[in-house]
Amino acid sequence: MTDTRSTTLPPESIRITTDSWTEPFWLAAKDERLVAPRCGSCGTFRFPPTPFCPACRSQDTDWVPVSGGSVFSYSIVRGLPGNRDAVLVPVVVEFADAPGVHVVSNLVDADPADVEIGRAVTLDFVVIADDWKLPVFRLADLAAER
Ligand SMILES: [Zn+2]
């Protein structure tokens, strides 16, 4: 039997590096919270994190929780080296409460036929190398969207 639901790369093979501008994101993920940097001066979100605000050049940063994710874009990848039956759905998620924030991750446990731009997603986390956690997304219940 073939499992056609989407997954991630083998979690133990996913490694991250952090620096002072990205570590708050990963530390929050370890606590299963999704946060994004918002300029402490003008309120513009900047993601991925950058040292300077593109709007006002301030370095003041507030890390704020984001929610209300939906599919902005996605792709479907069938087959990985060593696992020809694997299905990945790389996804770009946007957030109703964080304009301009686009998080690239995986949509997991989804039937690729159900994925559509605009579909609501829920947040989940997968433990990866070195006990970090990777934010991933699942399709929200269709019933919950209506
Ligand atoms: Zn700013």
Image (cartoon, helix red, strand yellow):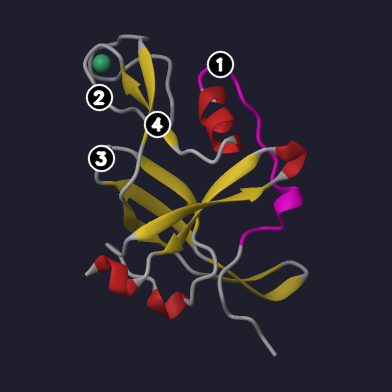
Question: For mark 1, does the 10 Å Cα neighbourhood hold few (<14), some (14 to 19), or many (20 or more) residues?
Answer: few
Mark 3 vs 4: CB contact within 8 A: no
Q: Amino acid at mark 3?
A: Asp
Please identify the quadrant where the C terminus is shown.
bottom left
Label 2 sits on a secondary structure element that is: loop
Q: Quadrant of residue 95?
A: top left
User: Distance between the Cα atoms at labels 2 and 1?
Assistant: 19 Å
Q: Is residue 55 left or right of residue 3?
A: left
User: Distance between the Cα atoms at labels 2 and 3?
Assistant: 12 Å
Location of ligand 1 given as a quarter of the image: top left
Q: Mark 2, mark 3: which one is toward the viewer? A: 3
User: Picture coordinates of residue 63 (x, y %)?
Assistant: 40, 24
> From which residue to which does the magenta span run?
8-21
- Check the image and report above or below for 32 versus 143: above
Label 4 CB less than 8 angstroms from ligand 1: no
User: Picture coordinates of residue 113 (x, y %)?
Assistant: 42, 80
Q: Give the label on residue 44, or none.
A: 2
User: Distance between the Cα atoms at labels 3 and 4?
Assistant: 11 Å
Say which residue label 3 marks: 97
Q: Is residue 106 left or right of residue 143?
A: right
Say which residue label 4 marks: 36
User: Picture coordinates of residue 107 (x, y %)?
Assistant: 49, 61
Label 3 CB less than 8 angstroms from ligand 1: no
Q: Earlier in the sequence, mark 4 or mark 2?
A: 4
The residue depicted at 24 percent of the width and 46 percent of the height is 96
The residue depicted at 42 percent of the width and 21 percent of the height is 50
